[in-house]
Image: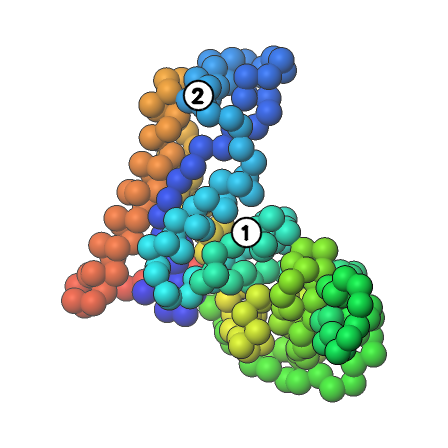
């Protein structure tokens, strides 16, 4: 469906209300913002305001429960790859995200010696950060990957390390990427599943872009951002309804493609 680019199908929804709309003392300053703020406040007045990370953890946990023993890979921006998201995830959930080039990395804690006293160590020696490791690396590997619908060849090297500030009890697999043409800066990505390959991590993170396409198409073609909702039920239902319609359109198209009755896919830049 859609060739190698893929699609994002909205599945679950939660209402996030910022501090200014959550019943605080801040007063709306834009014309017409008062009624929308009151509606959002009314929709959440019976529950405490929760952060985006808390809502994301709740949705991920629900999908992981549905999946049973199957592995779930959560692809997210670095802002969502915080310690609370990594540590609190279910056992069948793995995270793929970007890693800061100056991230503090450590070796795993050494094995405890027989008769050793004191509290067990939780981390080993300090390791060079991804930026320093990239500067020293002389064994870059040429790797063809398919990202954003195109196949490109990049240079990579991977290793495992402990990102103690975010996930103190489990090492992560890190992939550092270098553009052979030198036009882009070195970047680093990681996955909590140590068995994954660099290709899987890079192509998996690139699929995150389909989320942006979903928001764009829902706004441009389905009026996701147009309604001026003022009632409690409208605040809770309008945006999810636009996403559900988006799901139905894509699933209908996929069914038509299987029966070879759909119009050809329109290629766009």
**Count of marks placed on residues:** 2
Q: Residue at x 59, y 17 (%)?
A: 24
Q: Position of residue 114 (x, y in %)?
A: 75, 78
The quadrant holding residue 129 is bottom right
* Viewer-side residue, 70 vs 246: 70
Query: Horizontal placement of 186 versus 206: left or right?
Result: right
Q: Write down the residue under mark 2.
A: 46
Which quadrant of the figure contains the N terminus?
bottom left
Q: Residue at x 41, y 70 (%)?
A: 4
* Viewer-side residue, 260 vs 138: 138
Q: Tag 2: Cα neighbours inside 10 Å, few (<14), some, or many (≥20)?
A: few
State how far apart marks 2 and 1 are (Cα): 25 Å
Q: Position of residue 90 (x, y in %)?
A: 47, 56
Question: Is residue 183 something that shows in the picture?
Answer: no
Q: Write down the residue under mark 1.
A: 88
Q: Residue at x 35, y 42 (%)?
A: 243
Above or below residue 145? Residue 225 is: above
* Viewer-side residue, 126 vs 9: 126
Above or below residue 176? Residue 208 is: above
Visual colour scheme: rainbow
Question: Is residue 26 something that shows in the picture?
Answer: yes
The quadrant holding residue 95 is bottom right
Query: Which numbered marker is on residue 134?
Result: none
Query: Horizontal placement of 214 versus 175: left or right?
Result: left
Above or below residue 111? Residue 86 is: above
Q: Tag 1: Cα neighbours inside 10 Å, few (<14), some, or many (≥20)?
A: few
Q: Position of residue 123 (x, y in %)?
A: 75, 66
């Amino acid at each position: 469906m859609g060739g190698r680019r893929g699609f994002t199908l909205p599945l679950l929804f939660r209402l996030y209300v910022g501090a200014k709309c959550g019943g605080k003392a801040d007063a709306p300053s834009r014309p017409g913002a008062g009624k929308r703020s009151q509606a959002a406040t009314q929709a959440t007045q019976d529950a405490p305001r929760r952060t985006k990370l808390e809502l994301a953890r709740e949705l991920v946990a629900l999908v992981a429960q549905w999946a049973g023993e199957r592995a779930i890979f959560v692809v997210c921006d670095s802002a969502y790859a915080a310690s609370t998201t990594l540590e609190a995830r279910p056992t069948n959930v793995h995270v793929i995200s970007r890693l800061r080039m100056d991230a503090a990395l450590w070796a795993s804690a050494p094995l405890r010696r027989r008769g050793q006293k004191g509290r067990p160590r939780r981390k080993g020696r300090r390791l060079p950060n991804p930026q320093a490791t990239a500067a020293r690396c002389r064994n870059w590997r040429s790797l063809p990957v398919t990202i954003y619908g195109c196949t490109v060849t990049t240079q990579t090297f991977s290793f495992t390390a402990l990102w103690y500030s975010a996930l103190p009890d489990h090492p992560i697999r890190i992939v550092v990427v270098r553009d052979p043409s030198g036009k882009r800066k070195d970047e680093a990505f990681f996955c909590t599943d140590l068995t994954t390959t660099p290709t899987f991590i890079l192509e998996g993170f690139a699929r995150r872009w389909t989320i942006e396409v979903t928001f764009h198409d829902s706004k441009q073609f389905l009026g996701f951002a147009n309604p001026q909702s003022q009632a409690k039920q409208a605040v809770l239902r309008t945006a999810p309804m636009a996403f559900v319609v988006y799901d139905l359109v894509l699933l209908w198209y996929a069914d038509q493609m299987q029966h070879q009755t759909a119009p050809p896919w329109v290629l766009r830049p």
